[in-house]
Image (cartoon, helix red, strand yellow):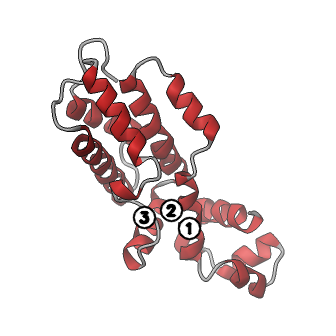
Amino acid sequence: MKILETALSLFRSRGFDKVTIDDICEATGIVKSTFYYHYKSKEQLIGDYVSIIDDISSEQIALVLMENTFVKQIWALFEIYLDFADKLGPDLVKQFLISNLNDYKSAIAPRDLKHYEVYINLIDKAQKIGQINNPTPAKELAETCICLADGIYILWAIESGQYSLLETCRQAINHLLLPAEGYKL
């Protein structure tokens, strides 16, 4: 974990392209063979870090479920993923996307998300009790919400974080779900 944390710190301060494996090894106090024992490349290191996000803890899920409406629970789940990307920053998100396109390793497709079914169930429940007015089947609506958030997240990275990732996604998901009065995000 020390290699990963040190590399991320260097990437954030200098930029991904300006950090070499030698820099990571020197800052971590390891030799290159140790780096290569754990990672094949800087790109794999980023991919491994991003894959951590899919391992949402039980505590985080408990916090999501403590929200008082299904609409807020849906948003709280999105917020976990989006906060992670926001903290990672647009430069490292770009590197993850490039790595993912070159060698499909990590989830960005809705069905690949570990908690995909949670989105579907929350949307279904929200629709059944009238918190969401969009009549699209829950599975299709969940996929569309995730794709919408992915699109915003990708453009945010391409545009070097020129807008608030969280606020833009919140507004877009609000427009898509069509929450009933009193349930808007």
Mark 2 touching mark 1, by CB under 8 A? yes
Camera-side residue: 69 or 159? 69
Camera-side residue: 27 or 70? 70
Answer few, some or many: residues within 10 Å of disc 1's Cα (few below 14, many 20 plus, some between 14 and 19): many
Which residue in the structure is indicated by mark 2?
Answer: 92
The disc label shown at residue 71, or none = none
Q: Tell me: residue 40, above or below residue 110.
A: below
The disc label shown at residue 94, or none = 3
Q: What is the three-letter code of the residue carrying label 1?
A: Ile
**Residue located 66% across and 80% down the image:** 21
Residue 139: give x, y in percent of width and height. 26, 44
Q: CA distance from mark 3 to mark 2?
A: 5 Å
The disc label shown at residue 46, or none = 1
Asked if one can make out residue 164 in the rendered structure from this viewpoint, the answer is no
Which residue is farthest right?
A: 29
Residue 10: give x, y in percent of width and height. 66, 65
**Residue located 37% across and 40% down the image:** 119
- Label 3, secondary structure: give it: helix
